[in-house]
Image: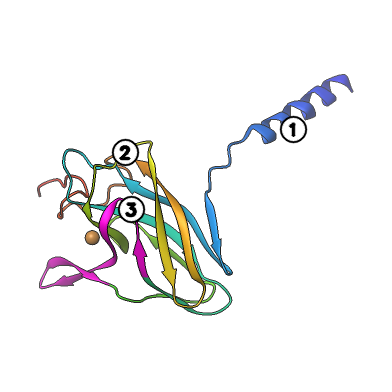
Amino acid sequence: MKLLFAASALALSLIASLPTTAAEYRVGDITITNPWARATPGRPRNGGAYLMITGGAADDQITGADTPVSKKAAIHGHSHENGVMKMREVRNLEVPAGEVMMLKPGGLHIMLIKLKHALKKGDSFPLTLHFAKAGDVTVEVQIMGVGAMKAGHGDHGGHGKMKKH
Ligand SMILES: [Cu+2]
């Protein structure tokens, strides 16, 4: 019995010491999870921020974003035109009810245009998202390493280096 008690006490202490890794933010019934950005080396012009959005009970839209670290923040997507990858601004990003959307390198992202300073790994910065119905939410963006989740999205300044093919 003593051993069993010791084992369950150990299990309990392990559970208690598990770090809570997910940063979650709510606006209405929409959830924003784990906002992050890549560190930018040197004197960067632009950067990218990424996060996960879980839609609420009704459809909504993100109509814009702001952050003190860059002159402008815009939602970007990619399109392929004649084999060339181009970025385009998404003026109103649909957030369908109940749907999970990943903004990630190589896909939809929040472009930080004209950074005011380099983004340093380990730091964080606030980013405000404007939802058409749910309103505004400010999330804290964690800055990860330069190559974090690198996914071939380095062709515009500040998104990291891309391998030559
Ligand atoms: Cu971009």
Check the image and report above or below for 63 versus 39. Answer: below
Q: Residues within 10 Å of mark 3 (few under 14, many from 20)?
A: some
Residue that sits furthest to the right in the current view: 1
* Image position, residue 49 (x, y; %): 33, 54
The amino acid type of the residue labelled 3 equals Pro
* Label annotation for residue 70: none
- Residue 98 within the segment the image draws in magenta: no
Q: Identify the magenta region.
A: 64-89
Residue sitting at x 36%, y 43%: 143
Please give the name of the residue rendered at 32% of the width and 43% of the height, measured from the top-left corner. Answer: 148
Nearest the camera: 79 or 135?
135
Q: Amino acid at mark 2?
A: Gly
Q: CA distance from mark 3 to mark 2?
A: 20 Å
Q: Which residue corresponds to mark 2?
A: 145
- What residue sits right under mark 1 in the picture? 12
In front of the other: label 3 or label 2? 3
Amino acid type of the residue that numbered disc 1 sits on in the rendered structure:
Leu
The residue wearing badge 3 is 68
